Structures are given as structure tokens and as C-alpha cells.
Amino acid sequence: MNRKDFLSAVVPLATFASAFTNPTSSSTTHGLKKIPPYLKKGDTIGICCPSGYISRDECQPAIKKMQEWGFNIRVGMTVGLRDFTFAGTDEERVKDLQQMMDDRSINAIMLGRGGYGAVRIIDKIDFTEFEKRPKWIIGFSDATVFHCHINHNYGIATLHSKMCNSFPDDFSKADQTQIDSIDSIRQCLVGEKMIYKRLPVVENRPGEGIGPLVGGNLSIIEQVTGSISNLQTEGKILFIEDVGEYLYKVDGMLWNLKRSKKLDRLKGFGKTIYQMVMEKVEKYHYPVCFDFPVGHVKENYALKCGVRHKLTVSKNETILKEL
């Protein structure tokens, strides 16, 4: 690739990694990770927008589908609220999220959409009540701020998955991949043990690893590195994803992972820009999995961050299994 192509190409990204940890005998923790209570019919999911703007109409397909699943829905004040590209001012977004986190009648919180804004308010959120009574925080992209912060500071599992803006307007016209990936949210929330299988990719590196699953959007992981929201990866399965980034920026973000020691103690990894990834992990021996269905794609399956999984990469298939 010449320098012009390297600087200008814009590509999608999806990466996986895994590591061994000591097993735990606790039924409520996985590697010292707390698992929020799973949902049952009649429980309530709150919708709020700590990042970008989304209208009530755009949330309606998600509201309707989650009601079909048997859940009650509580729509927060930031849905439909707008301040430039944000869903309200920083203060309004903090207030809405804080109320939902503290409200004991709300059992899970789905974010309306990503965009940008979570890093502006994360230090203003009081997690005292949330730590006592955890609930599932659901989202991806900019929601990676919450996945990283909660994992680092409280060891509570979160759900990396599609958000309200990812639900199709008409499910009868949605393809099966889209339907299945959205239903994986329901499966995770009600406590089903998840297992995902993928066809092999030539560039994969075989192996096996067990550990809590952590990760999210690569640019957000870089954004919080060195802060109190810093993602800790030692002894864990790491996944990364991104989209619409120039190749040179992806390369720089991957070097950040390596220089901040986030690749040192893993047992697996995966992404679509094969050479860039392999360059960073060549001295390690964990399995590497490319093109996993997570992130800014239709086939964005729900992943329980902080919960122990087993990643197996072989010449025949790749399997990610919740333990």
C-alpha cells in the first residue's frame, strides 16, 4: 500500500482477544465481576441519551420490540431533547441518567444512540446506588465509556449491543442477521448462556483462552486510556471495533493499545485490518480472531462485558462461548 492509500483509506474494524483467569466459585461473580440481575417479563427498561440526539419517533421501533418481549419501557427526558449534536446539555444528560440509575423500579438502561458526549459527563455520575443494586447498561460505540468505567471501577457486567437507533423501522423487511442480532439483546437480558460461532478467516491465529470479556469501540478505548475509566485487559478477552477511521488513525490507536500494555497479557485478538493487528501481537501467543460480528455493522451481536467466556479459534471455526 502506498502512502496516499494508507492515509486516506477508511475501513471498518472488529477485533477479539482472550486470556486465562482463575475460576470463581461464586454464582454471582465471574472473575470478581458482579452480574446484574437478569430480567423477567414485567420488568422495566429505561431509555436515555447520555450522548447524541435521537427523537422519540426514532426510538419507537425499539420501544415496540422490547414491549413485545414483555418488558415495560420508561422513556427518559433526554429522548427528543437537543443541544447542538447532544441529547440536551451536559447537566440534563447527567440528571436523566442519574435518575434512571438510582430508580429501583428500572431494571436495565438502554442508551438511545451513540455519537459523542459520554466522556463529558462520566465523572459527574454518582455510582453509589448503582454499585449497591446493579442493572444492565446497554449500548455500544460511545457507550464504551460506560463499559470501560464500570468495569474498571466497579467490576459490574454491562451489555455491549445495539441501541435504539439500530432497530429497523419494519421488522418484516429486516434480514435474518439483523433480526437475530437484535434478539440476542433479549437473550442476554433474560440470562441465556450465549454462544457465537463463525467461519474461519485465513488470517486468524488458532488457540484457546478463558477470561472475562472486555472491550468496545477502539477510539473510545484510546480516549479513556490513562484516566479513571481506563480499560484493564490483563487476564481478559479483549474485543475492539471501529468504523469510518483512516488507516493511519487505526494504526495509531493500535499502537496506543500496545504501548499502554493492553495487549501484553491476552490470549486472543481479532480485526479486519490483518497486518496492522498482527504487527502489534506477533510476539504474543494468544489466539487472534478477525471479522467477528460486533460493532458498527448489521450483524452486531450482544456481548456481556465482564462475564467469563471461552474463545476458541481453530482452522475450522471460531467459537465464543459464555461460561
Image: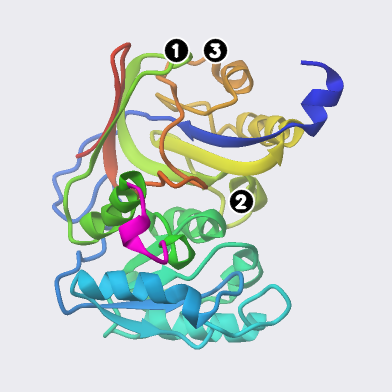
Residue 314 figure quarter: top left
- In the image, which is nearer the foreground, mark 1 or mark 2? 1
Q: Position of residue 18 (x, y in %)?
A: 38, 30
Magenta highlight on residue 63: no
Q: Residues within 10 Å of mark 1 (few under 14, many from 20)?
A: few
Question: In the image, 189: left or right of 18?
Answer: left
Residue type beneath disc 2: Ile
Compared with 271, 116 (above or below) is below
Residue type beneath disc 3: Lys
Q: Residue furthest right?
A: 4
C-alpha separation, residue under disc 2 versus residue under disc 3: 25 Å
Residue beneath disc 2: 220
Residue 52 figure quarter: bottom right
Residue 59 figure quarter: bottom left
Q: Main secondary structure of the magenta part?
A: loop
Q: Earlier in the sequence, mark 3 or mark 1?
A: 1
Q: Which residues are magenta?
A: 168-175
Residue beneath disc 1: 202
